[in-house]
Image (cartoon, rainbow, N blue to C red):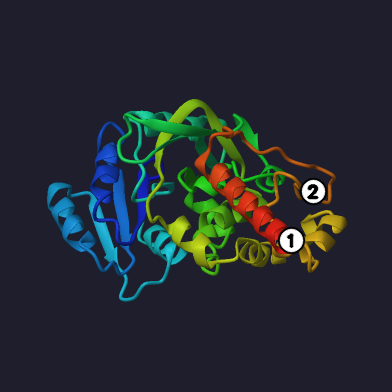
Amino acid sequence: MKNHISFIMPAYNCSKTIAESIESIMDGNFEKGDEIVICNDHSNDETDEVLNALKVKYSDLTVVNLLRNKGGAAARNTAVENARNEILFCLDSDNVLVPGSIQKLKAYLLTSGADIVALQELHYFKKTTDKVTHKWTFRPGLITLADCLAGPVTPGASGNYMFTKESWIRAAGYPEIAGALDAWGFGFRQLATGSKMLVMPDSYYYHRYGHESYWVRFSKSGKPSLTALQILLPFLDMLDQRDVDYIMSRRGRYDWFRNLEKHPIKLKTGERGKSGTRPLSDPSRIHILKKLLNRLLSLKKTEF
């Protein structure tokens, strides 16, 4: 059990995508002794029916049903609590693994002495993995707490990586106050509590976008900077005091998280991290630029 994998997956209204995600685990990434633990977060579509069919097909698949919708963090934590293995891999219910990638990642974890290991690239797609639209690339090797506070392109932000149950315990699990920042908050808390995170070079998985995902729903109604600030509060003594003053200020508290690429948060040690890379054609960046342009145009009209 010590070297087997428990694949964990939060599930909410994902009847159209979850079967593909499960099949990608079973396609060259699953070995005897592994298991899949899915937490159904009180879905109200056909997710339950799809999961029942998958349970019949795969005997090593366990489904835990929540009696009310509790959010992604609670679903992930519930899945971990029901996992029997010490090595965990979280895969979201709309993403797809490359055949044979996870056993290589496990070998990297076991030989490196790391607590957390991530695939290097996210290959974004909308409908089919044959049509990749853009990529995010993490820096290979060691990822530090400062890197987590230097921009959005870090393994924690993706949420789809391998980690030990011990690192989950040290981090006190996924933060259940965090909405769709639960994965980022968990990665931050793992690093802040001493876990070692590495990125395995020349590896990737497929990350779906362009639909009503958990993050899309959250970003429409939430305030990411204020939510991220709640995650940081117990660890403010690890940060540079000038940056603490900035993120606690009236000006910074609403925007510091969105502005990490322009204003990385420095640690008390003086370390300032580096984010991974993403293309200028990244649709999320284009969307932000369009919003900024529209805002500038509206201000211009107001002036006249």
Asked whether residue 121 appears in the rendered view, the answer is no
The crowding category of the residue bearing disc 1, from other C-alpha atoms within 10 Å (few below 14, some 14 to 19, many at least 20), is few
Q: CA distance from mark 2 to mark 1?
A: 42 Å
Q: What x and y, as percent, mark residue 249?
A: 80, 66
Q: Nearer the viewer, residue 155 or 222?
A: 222
Do callouts 2 and 1 mark residues in contact (Cβ within 8 Å)? no
Asked whether residue 232 appears in the rendered view, the answer is yes
- Name the quarter where the C terminus is drawn: bottom right
Determine which of the numbered discs, if any, sits on residue 266 in the image. 2
Identify residue for label 1.
304
The crowding category of the residue bearing disc 2, from other C-alpha atoms within 10 Å (few below 14, some 14 to 19, many at least 20), is many
Q: Nearer the viewer, residue 240 or 100?
A: 240
Q: Nearer the viewer, residue 168 or 261?
A: 261
Secondary structure under tag 1 reads: loop
Residue at 20% x, 62% y is: 46
- Going by the numbered disc 2, the residue's amino acid type is Lys
Q: What x and y, as percent, mark residue 244?
A: 81, 60
Q: What x and y, as percent, mark residue 300?
A: 71, 56
